[in-house]
Image (tube, grey):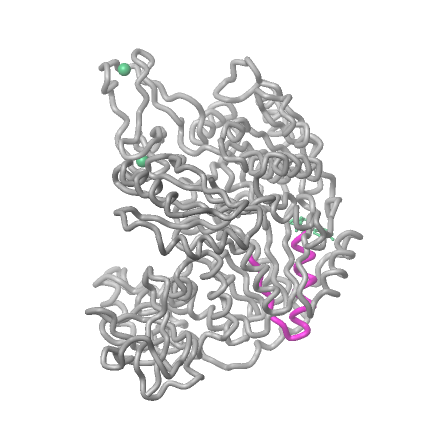
Amino acid sequence: MSIVQVALDVPLPRTFDYRTTDATAEDVGRLVLVPFGPSRRVGVIVGLSQTSRVEPERLRAVLRIVRSRPPLPPETLDLCRFCSRYYHHPLGEVLLSALPTALRRAHGTSLSAPVFFRLTAAGAARAGEALPRSAVARRALLDRLQAAGTLADSDIRGASARRALRALLAAGWVSSSDQPAHESGTPEPAEPASGVEAGPRLTCGQAAAVDVIKASLGGFQTVLLQGITGSGKTEVYLRVLETALAAGGQALLLVPEINLTPQLEARLAERFGAARLVTLHSGLAEGERLTRWDRAASGRAGIVAGTRLAVFTPLPRLAVVIVDEEHDASYKQQEGLRYHARDLAVFLGRQRGVPVVLGSATPSLETYRQAEAGRYRRLTLETRASGQPPAVRILDVHGMVLDNGLSPALAGALADNLARGEQSLLFLNRRGYAPTLLCPACGWVAPCHRCSARLTVHVPGRRLRCHLCGHHEAVPSACPACGSQDLRALGEGTQRLEQVLAARLPAARVVRIDRDATRRRGAFRALRDRIDANDVDVLVGTQMLAKGHDFPNLTLVGVLGADLGLMAADFRAEERLFALLLQVAGRAGRGDRPGQVLVQTAYPAHPLFAALQAQDYDGFARGQLAARQASGFPPFLHQALLRAEAPDEHTVFNFLGEAARRAGPLPDGLVVYDPVPASPARVAGRWRGQLLVQCAARGPLHRLLDVWLPRLPEHRVHWSIDVDPVEV
Ligand code: ADP
Ligand code: ZN
Ligand code: ZN
């Protein structure tokens, strides 16, 4: 008999021992079905042993080891172990959240290999044909199969979809298999050179950066590629990929946002051919995600591009890791396992002995400091690949009465740009129509009854919406406090701006791009296509527009509400605001025509705006770092945040108070602060508080967490630990 150590998706910081008769070292990394309490669970075998601390008669037996699939490779297990240790999160939860969902499902009582469906040749040939009107469900399923390639059994839900599936199987249009894709085991053949783009002549800066990175292939090194917006960082990545692929390697390319993947996917496919590429993001059907994961894990896909979760993909021939827009906050997961994909990417590079390229026009101050200290190699791109950086002007609107948020100067520039037939962007980082509904008679402001937040007025359906918890209700016809019928929507959101522009510039084609306008699948892409086709004159949008997009026809960027970001309490607020503004500004003038950027502010003397006008990220970053060093903030210190939430405030603070006491006598340099309310203090009916732990060195901080977290009191709170928090 031998014993397997199994990591399970349960919130306990340990593995579980099970009996088995036939497990071998080959099974480490395999999925396994085991009994757990009264139920059954899927886990991952992380080790074998001959002995257990559990008495032999109490050891339960493994139900089944899944040998129809390859095990997770040891490197991926090690990455997950590191992640578990560093973020103080149970290994089982780390491992199982790293796996595609299709693998995690314990189907009923047995872990049968998941079943996958694809169109047969007959199905593909006839997928475009008209079906009778009664065949809506069959049509829909055919369309989905055609779009996704593969669907897992678990992707096809609902009685009518299941009926349609049976009909299509019976007709021979769809086939089933226990493999998501047909395995071949060998790398995808290189595309013939014809049909694959060669790429432009590199600028001097690009060529130098490419040379350095290529020379670093084959060993671990972290490179900061700091290139101004439009300097052609992507082109540098592509050249590095080319070399890595030509040598038979695989590349991992992380991007911050799912909306950026189609544009990138198109560019990569154009250069390398679609067959060598997979993209991975949370928007994929389960079956398709597993198919792609398998193509990466078997080494057949050369390029794996994806959002933060892609960092866990097994890549047997990994040669280089690239993190685009490395400063982006979305690399940090903000719930459950709070990992930072950029930091894991650096671990991965060291583990696998491959270079890691961190690209950004506005590097995070953490990364910037590493470069200043010489631990990361800094490469800079100081000119645009074509054209000039935009001219930035700061508009002082202090004391001005604005017309729906627009200053005369910005309104005039917009009209001029429209008259020239050029595209403009108005940036306002606040969705909805207005952030406040106010009763001027008594001062009442519409609150969310579940959160410490105001409700935002939304035009469609005249609703009040809470941006924290999603609660919505009708706009009241009278003030609930005093009965006055004169309620006012105060302040500007993107919906109001869109309306105002449509009224002021009737000839302009105005589109709004924010979370509301792009919620529907494919909506963002459709808007992007219109922008590219020059079918849009004015874009109104939130920070969704700031991220890495290349809009070649855009020549004017106007920034409203820049001051919103100045008021935040978080010590990173300025860093975030500056990066955001510089990124938005960088959308202007990326084509042949020069760009201009107008930024409205009531605080034109704030040093941030001087740096923005000069587009001087280095000056800004050095100033911020000096201030943080002087007053003791990251990256000069390391932090962990104990977060707690519960339905009532007392429970939260009793827990945090007791937790602080149990931290015990602290070694020199470690500080545990008093519990404070989180910001916002209440979300969806739950009160939230936090406790900050800080130390100049990582070692003592992690040692404290190791002994402290198991000692936390058993209160009825939901708590979590956030190592290297980005929002405090
Ligand atoms: P970044 O990511 O640095 O902001 P991009 O990689 O999006 O910049 O490049 C900006 C634009 O410049 C793109 O349209 C790209 O096709 C173009 N470009 C990049 N490199 C070159 C080059 N060497 N010559 C001409 N155009 C280039
Ligand atoms: Zn709410
Ligand atoms: Zn009132």
Quadrant hosting residue 680: top left
- The residue drawn where x is 73% and y is 46% is 386
The image shows residue 710, relative to residue 24, as above or below, that is above
Question: In front here: 334 or 531?
Answer: 334
Rendering coords of residue 430 (x, y %): 45, 32
Quadrant hosting residue 51: bottom left
Task: Report the magenta residues as a range.
Answer: 233-254
- The residue drawn where x is 63% and y is 49% is 367
Quadrant hosting residue 611: top right
**Residue 262 appearing in the image:** no
Q: Residue furthest left?
A: 38
Q: Residue furthest right?
A: 204
Characterize the magenta stretch by its predominant secondary structure.
Answer: helix
The magenta stretch spans residue 604: no
* Residue 259 located left or right of residue 437: right
* Residue 260 located left or right of residue 594: left
Rendering coords of residue 537 (x, y %): 56, 35
